[in-house]
Image (tube, rainbow, N blue to C red):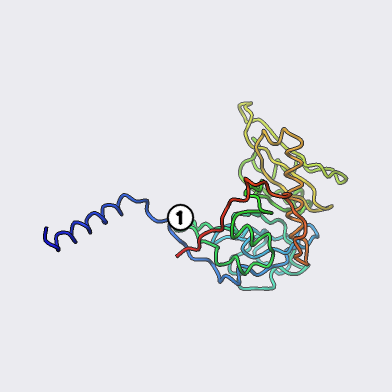
Amino acid sequence: MPLTKIFLVAALIAMLSGCLDEPPALQAPLPASEAALARERTVRVGGVDLYLPVLLLLSSTSSVGLTMSRQAADNPHAGYVPMDRLLSDPTFPQSAASPVAYVEVSLGSLRMLRDYASDAHASTIRVCPHLIRSWAREICESGLIDGRRVFYPDRFTLIDEQYLIAQRPGLAAYAGGWRSVGEAARASIPTPDSDAPVANCQTNAAGEKNSLCTVVARLVPNLLVVWSTNRSHAEQAHELEAQAVRLRCLIGRGMDASASDATLCMGPPDASEIDVGHRAEPG
C-alpha cells in the first residue's frame, strides 16, 4: 500500500476513535485570580466571627452564598450580595456594621465551581496552594478531611437565630414535606440550654414518609447550623449527634483566628480511607 494511503487510513482510524470517545468536560474560567479566591474574609454571623476563604463563600462562578442582615448599613442590596462586591472589596464584609444573616456553605466549592451559564465547571486546583488553612487545602487538593474521604453533611447553612425567626427566610425549596427548609428549621430550633440537634422529619401531603429531614443544632447562643440528612440517619440518635459533632468541630476551625487546625474533626483515618490521591492538575 502506498505510504500516503497508509497515512490516510491511520488518520481516518484516529478520527473515528475520537468520535467514539466521551467529549471532554467543559472547563469554565474562575471568577477571579487564585490569590483573590483564597483570601480570607471575616464573616460575622449570629455575633460570631468566622474566618473563611472567598472560595467557600461562592455557590457558583457567578453567585455568592452570603445573605446580609437587613440592618447592614453598608449593603444597599437589602440582603443580596453581588459577586463583584465580594470580589472587588477586600474589606467586605469585615466589620460589625455588616453582619451576615446567613451563609450557605458547600464544601464542594473548595473543589469545583459550577458555571450555570455554560453548564461547565471551573477547577479550583490552582487555588489550593494559596489557601491559608490546612483543612481547606486538604479538601481542595484531595477531597479529604483529616485523611478521610467522607465528611457528612458536606452542605450546611450557618444562620443568625433571630433572623431565622423574624425574617422567615425560605433557605431552600423543599425539606421533609414542609414548604421550605426555613419553615422546617423554625419549627425545630433547639432550646437555649440544649446542645442536642433537633431533626424535623415530616410526611408529605399524601401521608407518605419523605426521605429527607431538616436538622438544626445550636453552635453558640444566637448561631444555628441547619442541614438536611436522610431519614434513616435522623432516626438514629447516635448518627445525628455524630453529624452535629463533626460540624461543630469543622465550624470551630473557621472560628479560630489563629488557623491552628489543631483538632481532628474525624479522628484517625482507617487504612481503607487514606488511599485517595491528589487531583491531577488540568492541562
Name the one closer to the observer, 19 or 56: 19
Residue 266 as seen in the image, left or right of residue 139: right
Residue sitting at x 67%, y 38%: 213
Say what secondary structure mark 1 lies in.
loop
158 and 126: which one is in front?
Answer: 126
At x 75% / y 45%, what residue is drawn? 244
Task: Look at the image and tell me whether residue 215 can be seen.
Answer: yes
| Quadrant of the drawing holding the C terminus | bottom left
Q: Can you name the residue that lies furthest to the right here?
A: 193
What amino acid type is highlighted by mark number 1?
Asp
Q: Nearer the viewer, residue 105 or 95?
A: 105
Residue 259: percent from left, percent from top: 75, 65
Look at 61% across and 26% down and name the residue there.
Answer: 206
Q: Residue furthest left?
A: 2
Residue 102 is situated, as x and y percent measured from the top left of the image, at: 71, 56
- Residue 67 location, quadrant: bottom right
Give above or below for 198 relative to 127.
Answer: above
Relative to 138, is 10 on the left or the right? left
User: Which image quarter holds the N terminus?
Assistant: bottom left
| Left or right of 165 in this view: 4 | left
Residue pointed to by mark 1: 119
Q: Is residue 85 visible?
A: no
